[in-house]
Amino acid sequence: MQVVADRNALHRLLAEVRSSGRRIALVATMGSLHRGHLSLVHRAAECADFVLTSIYVNPMQFAAGEDLAEYPRSLDADLEALGETPCDAVFTPDDATMYPSEGRTRIEVPLLAERFCGADRPLFFPGICQVVVRLFNLIRPDAAVFGCKDLQQLRIIEQLCTDLAFPIEIIAAPTVREADGLAMSSRNAYLSDFERERAPMLYRTLKECTEQIQSGRPLRQVLDTASADLGVQGFSVRYLGAARWDDLREPSPGDAPVALLACAVLGQTRLIDNIVVEAGLPH
């Protein structure tokens, strides 16, 4: 497994890979890797001949007062973990490599970012779009694998590729969960023991909402009750809502599939999760 940190080394490596006709898949991460990230690498290896993982904590997606400085960084451990996977190379750029000049271009997919994380963290998706476009331009992968846990991010990146005509296949990989249902996240390391015990309630709540919706209970009533119940359990709910799969707008009866998306802060930890209701909303 090769590790490269600068553009020239990256371009030399990828030129050699392309000269042999191999298909390249990208797994973009911010490091602090867990089994969820590693599952993306394995998925990438199923659809490509050469897997490149990037590790870069992107400052553009953090607002003032967010956890950029505290975000867990563990490069040595990450490289060791990747060495046990089908990863062929790791790109570890610094800020100067990713952003060599003052950025004057803003990239957004506003219609998909109006709700949920886009409303809760206004700088987040412009920052995501910025770094993803830069990675795509630097690496020019044939495919890129993203997890379904960040569902809104996944849809925005899919739309970005369509609108900007990137010839890149976006592959969605399922959310990897702990045994108790908690979606794996690097930020789970922030949870205290007490908070870790409570954290799986978020996913359990989404599953309960799905059951109630499919039984015919009104959507708004289900979501409002669930949000209040999470508040009683110590969660500060940032959003809990439903969206059509294609455009993330508010769904109507009969729409399918429909996603339920949730974000709640537990202690100091921001948790996000989602569940897809394949049958959609009853008429």
Image (cartoon, helix red, strand yellow):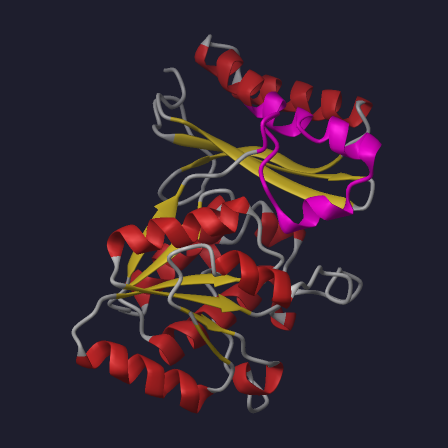
Name the foreground residue: 24 vs 263: 24
Can residue 165 be found in the magenta stretch?
A: no
Residue 155 appears anywhere in the view: no
Q: Residue furthest top?
A: 215
Assign the C terminus to one quadrant of the image: top left
Residue 65 appears anywhere in the view: yes
| Residue displayed at 39% across by 80% down | 138
The number of discs equals 0
Question: In the image, residue 230 lies at what x, y percent?
Answer: 73, 25
| Residue displayed at 34% across by 28% down | 256
Q: Quarter of the image holding residue 69?
A: bottom right
Question: In the image, residue 58 lies at what x, y percent?
Answer: 60, 70
Name the foreground residue: 176 vs 233: 176
Q: Is residue 255 left or right of residue 217?
A: left
In the rendered view, would you say 91 is above or below 47? Answer: below
Instruction: Specify start and end residues of the magenta stretch as a single range.
Output: 178-206
In the rendered view, would you say 95 is above or below 117? Answer: below
Name the foreground residue: 77 vs 252: 77
Q: Residue furthest left?
A: 21
| Residue displayed at 81% across by 22% down | 232
Question: In the image, residue 34 lies at what x, y percent?
Answer: 57, 49
Assign the N terminus to one quadrant of the image: bottom left
In the rendered view, would you say 186 is above or below 82? Answer: above
Can residue 188 be found in the magenta stretch?
A: yes
